């Protein structure tokens, strides 16, 4: 369908993975004159970059939170957000099996967006433009706050003299088990929860409020 692509921001974390995957798929990468211009740039730069691109080809961005309005004045446009966290230390395999939110305004744009997602090795799903903030908030909680939770848990392990490295297998197994809730809250063992609070208050008091919020949110 599309044989030539220009990736703007090809040196970034998302852009480098996408560029490598396109190379694997035999798609020609161009600096101009491409059938599709893909913007892998920071959200704040999307509108300005889009305005500087001549109208005609398809244009898309990979932002999860930015609406299609930032791609004006282009009308042949769509959004494709790979629902994945990326690092420069890995390559295009980061795309394999991840899902992708496709935001479109016409059947043709949806068709192109879904085709492109499959080309990259992604599993597409449709997303309405106006719910992007809600969608992106969920993605941020699942990815970014997982980093926060690991850091906090590691601090408590260090205070207890336990190895923080032991947390990663536990966190992975929780995911493998389909996020099935276990532990004191699932058992209604509020005495243990209170002992947690007391220990945190004595050792890391700045984390007690966070524990309380999480405990309340975890309670069925």
Image (tube, helix red, strand yellow):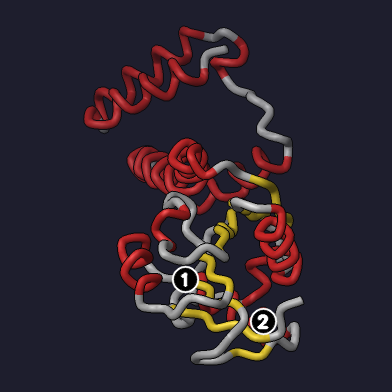
Q: Is residue 117 left or right of residue 33?
A: right
Residue 180 position within the rendered picture, expressed as x and y whole percent measured from the top left: 68, 28
Residue at which label 2 appears? 22
Of marks 2 and 1, which one's residue comes earlier in the chain? 2
Q: Is residue 203 left or right of residue 107?
A: left
Name the residue at 40% across, 12% down: 194
Q: Is residue 58 above or below residue 190?
A: below
In front of the other: 16 or 37: 37
Q: Is residue 109 above or below residue 65?
A: below
Checking the image for residue 61, the label placed there is none
Residue 115 seen by the camera: yes
Is the Cβ of the residue at disc 2 closer than 8 Å to that at disc 1? Answer: no
Q: Is residue 180 left or right of residue 17?
A: right
Residue at which label 1 appears? 40
Q: Are there few (<14), some (14-19), or many (20+) residues within 10 Å of tag 2?
A: many
Instruction: Determine the CA span between mark 2 and mark 1.
Output: 14 Å
Residue 6 position within the rendered picture, expressed as x and y whole percent measured from the top left: 54, 83
Callout 1: SS: loop
């Amino acid at each position: 369908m599309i044989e030539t692509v220009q990736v703007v921001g090809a040196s970034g974390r998302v852009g480098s993975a996408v560029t490598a995957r396109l190379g694997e798929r035999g798609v020609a990468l161009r600096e101009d004159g491409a059938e599709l211009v893909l913007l892998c740039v920071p959200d704040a730069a999307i509108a300005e970059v889009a305005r500087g691109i001549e109208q005609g080809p398809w244009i898309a961005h990979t932002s999860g939170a930015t609406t299609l309005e930032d791609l004006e004045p282009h009308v042949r446009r769509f959004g494709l957000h790979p629902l994945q966290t990326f690092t420069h230390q890995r390559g295009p395999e980061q795309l394999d099996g991840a899902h992708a939110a496709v935001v479109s305004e016409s059947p043709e744009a949806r068709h192109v967006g879904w085709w492109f997602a499959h080309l990259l090795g992604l599993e597409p799903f449709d997303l309405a433009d106006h719910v992007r903030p809600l969608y992106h908030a969920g993605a941020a909680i699942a990815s970014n706050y997982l980093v926060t939770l690991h850091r906090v848990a590691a601090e408590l392990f260090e205070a207890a003299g336990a190895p923080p490295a032991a947390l990663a297998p536990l966190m992975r197994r929780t995911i493998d088990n389909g996020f099935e809730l276990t532990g004191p809250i699932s058992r209604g063992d509020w005495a243990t929860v209170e002992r947690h609070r007391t220990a945190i208050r004595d050792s890391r008091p700045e984390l007690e409020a966070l524990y309380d919020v999480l405990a309340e949110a975890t309670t069925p």
